[in-house]
Image: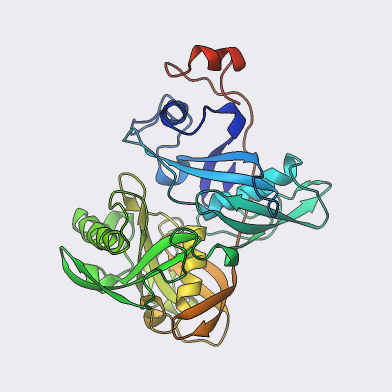
Amino acid sequence: MRGGTSKAVFLAGESLPAPGPARDALILALFGSPDPRQIDGLGGADLLTSKLAIIDAASRRDADLDYTFAQVSITEAKVDYDINCGNISAAVGAFAVDEGLVTVTEPVTVVRIHNTNTGRILLAEVPVLDGAAAIEGDYVVHGVPGSGAPIALDFSQTAGGITGSLLPTGNEVDQLDTTIGTVAATIVDLANLTVFFHASSVGMAGTEGPGEFTDEHLTAVAAVKEAAASLLGMATDGLTPVPAIVSPPALYTSFASGETIEAADIDLVARVVGGRPPVLHKAYPGTLAACTGVAARIPGTTVSDVARRSDSDDLTIGHTSGIMPVRARVTGGDGSWSVEEAVYHRTARRIAEGTAFIRNVVTSNDRERNPDGVE
């Protein structure tokens, strides 16, 4: 399924071995990893198209299903589960409707998704037509050709999913001691644990695209990410905290369309580095859009420092491939903040369904259960 600017393979958890090395080996074989082209599997040889959604029956009474996200490395024998994908979360909502995993109502069905990666519930409002997730519509996602029916995703209930707190350090800004010097950063735990810092602190303008992103930039960004992880007592070699580089509104060219993004049309510029090995994201993760919107509404953060001032709950993010709007409402103060809303929209659709054939990793017991492959 495509969800927003990403694609993922969807599997039922019961078709896989239990979590552990055997499951990861099967997933790597399914995707054709490690291999830069993923030529012998279903991977798309890109950070945004080497993703997996594992769907299980709900383990919580307040959810309609369990959803586990996996980022499959392209060049390493590694499957990461310490992160969620907001684009694929939209596809999970559509999948739940089409698979009858939720009571379907028209014109909109609300799907309560338990994301096991963060242990939090997110809500997907899926447009429905004739009992199925609607596909056609006028909503445009920059980085996706054409248009589709908008799926609204609300991540307001996901605060503290990894660390237990929206602001894990208790501070709106922390001074990180990194190998490139002291960097002011804001760490926010909503949808995905994220560390936000100014582009200028890592020697960037902030508007760089894939062709302008250098090894020196990656090294500097990695230094900030690792310092943030160390501050939180986390392993420094995971995918989180996700590094997000922010800067004031500015003119630049969209990587996807070649069109000019005007400074007047956006409230800030943001770039994200992720994956294994780390690369510049070619669009903007939905989870980070929600997190960015919330961070922008908290005075004193590195995000609010660069964002255009506004009394509105709406924020327009200028990303690598265009523009992404998000709506965030935050209440509270003095280090105690409550997220009332963190909403963005994506489109999604099913691309294919069937059986994938893998090699060399399936045990005899697995073959007896599913002799033809993985569905």
- Residue at 45 percent across and 40 percent down: it is 50
Q: Quadrant of residue 81?
A: top left
Q: Position of residue 324 (x, y in %)?
A: 52, 66
Q: Position of residue 333 (x, y in %)?
A: 49, 85
In the displayed structure, does residue 58 sit left or right of residue 166?
Answer: right
- Position above or below: 196 against 312: above
**Closer to the camera in the image, 1 or 168:** 168
Give the position of the C terminus as an image quadrant: top right
- Name the colour scheme: rainbow
Whether residue 370 is visible: no
- Residue at 29 percent across and 49 percent down: it is 237
**Closer to the camera in the image, 311 or 184:** 184
- Position above or below: 242 against 81: below
Marks counted in the figure total 0
Whether residue 54 is visible: yes
Q: Position of residue 92 (x, y in %)?
A: 63, 47
In the displayed structure, does residue 74 sit left or right of residue 290?
Answer: left
**Closer to the camera in the image, 281 or 297:** 297
- Residue at 52 percent across and 75 percent down: it is 315
Q: Quadrant of residue 227?
A: bottom left
Give the position of the N terminus as an image quadrant: top right
Q: Position of residue 363 (x, y in %)?
A: 48, 15
**Closer to the camera in the image, 298 or 149:** 298
Q: Quadrant of residue 197?
A: bottom left
